[in-house]
Image: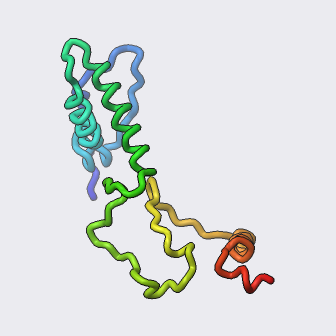
Amino acid sequence: MKIRRRPFRCRCHPSPPSVIVPLSPATLEGYGLVSYSWMYPIERSLRTLKQYVRNKARPEGSITEAYVMNESSIFCSRYLRGIETRFTRDERNDDTIVEDEVIGDFEIFKLKVQPLGASSVRVISQEEKQLFHWYILNNANEISEFRE
């Protein structure tokens, strides 16, 4: 990518206490106007919050109340049994194993887990691997007959 040497024109003049961060021409070329490179997710969340407003004279109270209610209902719905929520229903491409197809009788592999947040790959050390093996061998109910 060829970097053009052209002057950067500031579209909004900062007030005196602001700090101006210099931007490279490559950054400007890659994103266009910098303010638009991050705006879309925030605009979507603001739209959702604006939909909560019922009292236009005091919108912040409506937004706060609806946000807290939404967060608490999501938190509580993760622990409901027997009620289908968006967290407990099957996924669109359901790949769960049915009737001990491959996994055998170990209960630990039958748990349906839904991780939170971004995934990350981490290589475990030999000591951690030995600790995991020790924990499984000492705490799995399925192999208790072999321990004695």
Q: Residue at x 70, y 71 (%)?
A: 139
Q: Quadrant of residue 95?
A: bottom left
Residue in the foreground of this view, choosing between 108 and 132? 108
Quadrant containing the C terminus is bottom right
- Is there any visible trace of residue 10 in the rendered image? yes
Residue 10: x and y in percent read 25, 28
Residue found 25% across the figure and 14% down from its top: 58
Q: Residue 45's spot in the image, x, y percent?
A: 27, 37
Examine the rendering and report whether any part of residue 8 can be seen: no
Q: Position of residue 116 (x, y in %)?
A: 45, 54
Tell me the quarter of the picture where residue 51 sits.
top left
* Figure label count: 0
Q: Residue furthest front?
A: 82
- Residue farthest along the right direction in this orientation: 148
Vertical placement of 140 versus 64: above or below? below
Snapshot colouring: rainbow
104 displayed left or right of 10: right
Q: Quadrant of the N terminus?
A: bottom left
Which residue is nearer to you in this view: 50 or 112?
112
**Relative vertical location of residue 136 with respect to residue 69 in this rendering, above or below:** below
Residue 111 vertical position relative to residue 31 in the rendered view, above or below:
below
In which image quadrant can residue 137 be found?
A: bottom right
- Viewer-side residue, 25 vs 121: 121
Residue name at image x 32 percent, y 66 percent = 90
- Where residue 104 sits: x, y (%)? 52, 86
Residue at left 60%, top 69%? 123
In this view, the residue in front, 64 or 84, is 84
On the picture, is 64 further left or further right than 114? left
